[in-house]
Image (cartoon, rainbow, N blue to C red):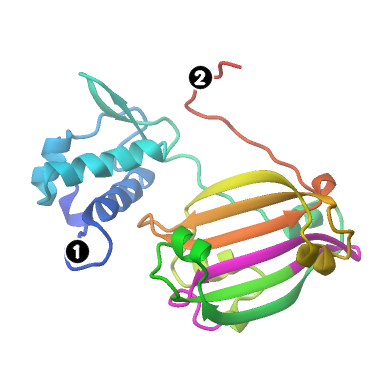
Amino acid sequence: MNVPRQNIKLDADSGTPLYMQMAGELAAAIRKGTWSSGEALPSERVLADALGVSRITSRKAMALLAEQGLIRRVQGVGTFIMPGTNELPLSLIGVTTLAQLDGFMAHTRWLSRSIRAADFEEATHLDLPPLANVAHLECLRVADGIVMALDHWTLPAAAMPDPQASGDSPCAFLSHRGMPVVRALQRFQAVNAPVPVAQHMGIAPGTALVLTTRIGYTHAQRPIELNRSWCHGDHYLLVADLCGQTVTK
């Protein structure tokens, strides 16, 4: 089985581990339809030989693709493309857009946009060195005069050297710069509003909110944005399309 070697670029001098580069390049090839849904991938050995990497590197790359839900590994049989991986594009719809779709007059009210040193959590999530410079943006999502959410955005300063030029959507800004978010991991948590959050949102401390934490990734599977959003539960709707998984409960 052929490997699209000419389309897969690995840089041994890059600070990004080779297995992460390989996983990112293969993920991009899968999403472009190089292999069809359900089709078998070349073996770890074939991929390693074709791309000039070790078997360990190839194995770690394939494990990362499996973790991301792009491939399915069947012991003794092979590795297969998960159904739908090159058919369903990622769509990130923000609170402001959802409010507009519901007929509200919605807008973004910026609180701050600056370059500063990353804290420990930001550096960890964005795979940055300690105290690396990041763009930090803080805004309120407002609909018909009601604060619906408080958003914190953190991006590597290299991706957004001038936070004032971000517009109302950092994700749209990244797309315009040729670094679109193509995959995201998002966590949902019920929390009570901390005092600083409550002050910004004009609510009582301890008010029940939904906290979402999202890490967005580029085609190369590099983390490019960290978004933390505190939202009123009655203004938040989560819809999930479960594909390629057997529902047991």
Q: Is residue 94 left or right of residue 85?
A: right
Tag 1 residue: 11
Q: Is residue 138 left or right of residue 22?
A: right
Q: Which residues are magenta?
A: 140-162
Q: Is residue 14 left or right of residue 90?
A: left
Q: Position of residue 184 (x, y in %)?
A: 51, 50
Provide the secondary structure element on which disc 1 rests.
loop
Q: Position of residue 37 (x, y in %)?
A: 37, 31
Quadrant occupied by the N terminus: top left
Query: Where 170 sits versus 116, above or below?
Result: above
From this viewpoint, which residue is outermost toward the top?
248
- The three-letter code of the residue at mark 1 reads Asp
Main SS type for the magenta part? strand
Identify which residue is drawn at 74% across, 63% down. 150
Q: Is residue 2 visible?
A: no
Q: Residues within 10 Å of mark 2 (few under 14, many from 20)?
A: few
Which badge, 2 or 1, is on the more N-terminal residue?
Answer: 1
Q: Quadrant of residue 116?
A: bottom right
Is residue 142 shown in magenta? yes
Identify which residue is drawn at 17% across, 55% down. 6
Q: Quadrant of residue 227?
A: bottom right
| Viewer-closest of 173 and 207 | 207
Measure how far apart labels 2 and 1 are at the Cα level.
Answer: 38 Å
Q: Is residue 207 visible?
A: yes
Identify which residue is drawn at 79% across, 56% down. 193
Residue 246: which numbered mark, if any? 2
